[in-house]
Image: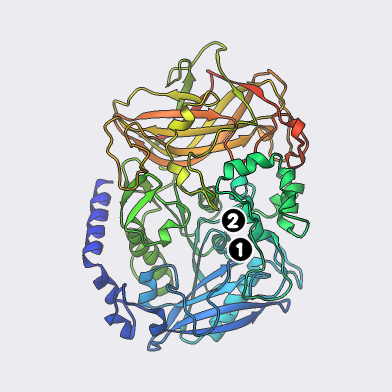
């Protein structure tokens, strides 16, 4: 391991020092004289817009950027998106084409496509369109659209070398994963990045709880169109305030939001009619189809991605179990899509992680992956590990030959009396109790603003929550030795409630020592002294504690087991830091408010259904960590 880290550091320093010279050596033609700062895609690429006809006759808008240097053949890098191929017009160019600046300057044929029913493509859009394993004649899905598009591209685009790679972030990441199903023989390498794996566990839901913070995004996916367009056909609701907590609190039950989205918003109607993990959601998941995958795969994600964390981790692990292809994972200290940006200082909210982290990924991980499988460059097996993951506590890269690492063990920490967290099992039937009031929900952030995607809160200071009476706190003493968590976390709660339903939120927090210095990014009203950094958090809507498909009421005052799986972490709690667990029942308006009275469908709950309830968490509850030995 030490040899790997020393080699990694040497490579990183060499790349940083050589900067543009590394790129110049591999640039095509007259691009060799350009620098990153002066490089303009329009000077080195030609742009063509075409329509590609699918097997059912539907035409998809496709934009092709090809290097002007035609002295050699290039692979095709392909992205399918519901977010548009903008800018439209053969004289209008993107600032950056392809996955990163290095690959654009090296030279690749880069293709973007508006998926079926979106923007300038024909057809009817279906949100998370279900995969059809055994298609009959005339049936189509995103796998067949991808196959037909690749077939056309390799036969009709000049100077291509017959190899295709696909990449995409978020929803384009979902389409990247989809390309692995019934893959075209020319498809050699795929990088699903922050891919949606299942809309019931990514983006709009977390373990049965509706993510109210994404409510405004319903506009993007919910309004249909019937003709190709180059302009937006949807609008966002005007909420008339910069305080989203107060906006949603004033609106009350979810049914009151109907005045913003009518019947013409298809996705809003689907969300309301399918609160459970029924067939509607199940058939839209992509994870269950990931078997016998042939193309090489590099899954990429961010440890602090508020949108899609389930997707990348589950995509990687499922392919690893069910396929024998080249399959690797990269997880960095990023929020949603940060790895594609070019920030010098990488920080999430108040917490700084290092310089040029995304640049290092782009040039030394992502580019190597695609160049090997599409251009035949490098000895990838010796250059890249199975798992390239960033330790968000020590703030450096780690390399493993498996994820989670093989040299881990399970250790349980018990939620002991007197706000203690320790490894001694608690005997007896003692419990901590709090009152959960739907009219005064615990906020997920102190910030007063309206955000489309909550990013910063993933590392936010949690002191404000720890000081509320409706948030339970359990904390270790200052650590005498570092503790490194590398893998999943399972909260095994034993709870009781005076009501018949409840949400349970578990947060893992790194409590900094008193002498920790501030960062450039630290908000003016905060100090990093005793900072409570959220490392991981998750919610479970209690009615789904046994089955996401079958909601089940709580029996009032009865001790009940509630197990909550938190997504993986790679985090070292340093010497002098403390490990803290917070437990609460509201998390607003990140998730909607549970009425705490069992109703069939919370989207139709009435004001009188929302009741103040007393919740207990028994001290015999435990949190099971995956600890690196």
- Residue, disc 1: 181
Give the residue displayed 27% in from the left and 55% down from the top.
8
Q: Secondary structure at mark 1?
A: loop
Q: Is residue 263 left or right of residue 372?
A: right
Quarter location, residue 237: bottom right
- Comparing 533 with 439, the one in front is 439
Identify whether 475 is placed above or below 29: above
> Are the two marked residues, 1 and 2, in contact with CB atoms closer than 8 angstroms?
yes
Residue 184: image location, x then y, percent: 58, 71
- Residue, disc 2: 290
Residue 118: image location, x then y, percent: 65, 69
Residue 181: image location, x then y, percent: 61, 63
Count of picture labels: 2
Question: Circle 1: is it few (<14), some (14-19), or many (20+) Cα within 10 Å?
Answer: many
Quarter location, residue 155: bottom right
Identify whether 466 is placed above or below 142: above
- Comparing 245 with 130, the one in front is 245
Residue 208 visible in rendering: no
Give the residue displayed 46% in from the left and 43% down from the top.
458
Residue 294: image location, x then y, percent: 53, 63
């Amino acid at each position: 391991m030490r040899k790997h880290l020393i080699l990694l550091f040497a490579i990183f320093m060499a790349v940083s020092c050589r900067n543009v010279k590394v790129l110049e050596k591999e640039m095509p033609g007259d691009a060799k004289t350009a620098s990153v700062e002066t490089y303009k895609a329009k000077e080195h690429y030609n742009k063509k817009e075409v329509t590609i006809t699918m097997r059912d006759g539907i035409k998809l808008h496709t934009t092709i950027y090809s290097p002007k240097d035609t002295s050699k053949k290039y692979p095709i890098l392909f992205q399918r998106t519901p977010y548009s191929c903008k800018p439209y017009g053969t004289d209008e160019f993107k600032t950056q084409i392809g996955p990163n600046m290095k690959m654009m300057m090296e030279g690749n044929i880069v293709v973007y496509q508006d998926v079926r029913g979106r923007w300038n493509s024909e057809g009817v859009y279906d949100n998370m369109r279900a995969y059809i394993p055994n298609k009959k004649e005339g049936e189509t899905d995103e796998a067949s659209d991808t196959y037909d598009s690749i077939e056309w591209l390799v036969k009709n685009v000049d100077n291509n070398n017959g190899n295709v790679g696909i990449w995409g972030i978020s929803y384009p990441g979902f389409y990247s994963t989809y390309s692995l199903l019934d893959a075209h023989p020319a498809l050699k390498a795929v990088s699903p990045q922050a891919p949606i794996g299942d809309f019931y566990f990514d983006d709009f839901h977390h373990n049965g709880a509706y993510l109210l913070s994404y409510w405004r995004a319903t506009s993007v996916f919910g309004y249909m169109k019937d003709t190709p367009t180059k302009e937006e056909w949807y609008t966002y609701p005007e909420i008339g305030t910069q305080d989203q907590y107060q906006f949603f609190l004033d609106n009350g039950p979810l049914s009151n939001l109907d005045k913003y989205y009518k019947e013409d918003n298809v996705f809003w109607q689907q969300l309301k009619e399918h609160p459970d993990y029924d067939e509607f959601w199940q058939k839209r998941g992509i994870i269950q189809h990931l078997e016998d995958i042939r193309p090489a795969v590099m899954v990429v994600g961010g440890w602090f991605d508020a949108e899609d964390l389930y997707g990348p981790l589950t995509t990687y692990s499922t392919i690893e179990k069910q396929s024998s292809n080249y399959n690797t994972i990269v997880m960095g200290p990023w929020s949603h899509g940060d790895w594609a940006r070019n920030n010098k200082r990488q920080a999430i909210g108040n917490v700084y992680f290092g310089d040029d982290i995304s640049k290092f990924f782009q040039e030394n991980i992502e580019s190597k992956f695609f160049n090997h499988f599409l251009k035949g460059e490098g000895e990838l097996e010796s250059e890249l590990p199975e798992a390239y993951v960033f330790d968000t506590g020590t703030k450096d890269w780690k390399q493993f030959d498996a994820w989670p690492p093989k040299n881990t063990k399970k250790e349980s920490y018990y939620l002991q009396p007197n706000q203690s967290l320790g490894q001694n099992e608690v005997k007896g039937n003692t419990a901590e109790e709090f009152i959960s009031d739907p009219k005064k929900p615990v906020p997920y952030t102190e910030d007063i603003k309206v955000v489309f995607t909550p990013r910063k809160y993933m590392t936010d200071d949690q002191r404000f929550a720890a000081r509320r009476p409706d948030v339970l706190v359990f904390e270790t003493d200052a650590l005498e030795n570092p503790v490194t968590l590398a893998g999943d976390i399972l909260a095994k709660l034993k709870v009781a409630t005076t009501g018949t339903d409840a949400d349970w939120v578990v947060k893992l927090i790194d409590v900094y020592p008193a002498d920790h210095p501030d960062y450039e990014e630290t908000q003016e009203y905060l100090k990093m002294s005793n900072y409570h950094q959220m490392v991981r958090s998750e919610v479970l809507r209690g009615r789904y504690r046994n089955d996401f498909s079958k909601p089940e009421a709580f029996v009032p005052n009865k001790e009940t087991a509630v197990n909550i799986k938190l997504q993986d972490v790679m985090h070292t709690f340093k010497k002098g830091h403390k490990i803290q667990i917070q437990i609460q029942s509201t998390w607003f308006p990140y998730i909607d408010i549970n009425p705490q009275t069992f109703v069939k469908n919370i989207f139709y709950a009435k004001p009188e259904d929302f009741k103040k309830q007393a919740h207990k968490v028994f001290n015999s509850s435990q949190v099971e960590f995956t600890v690196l030995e």
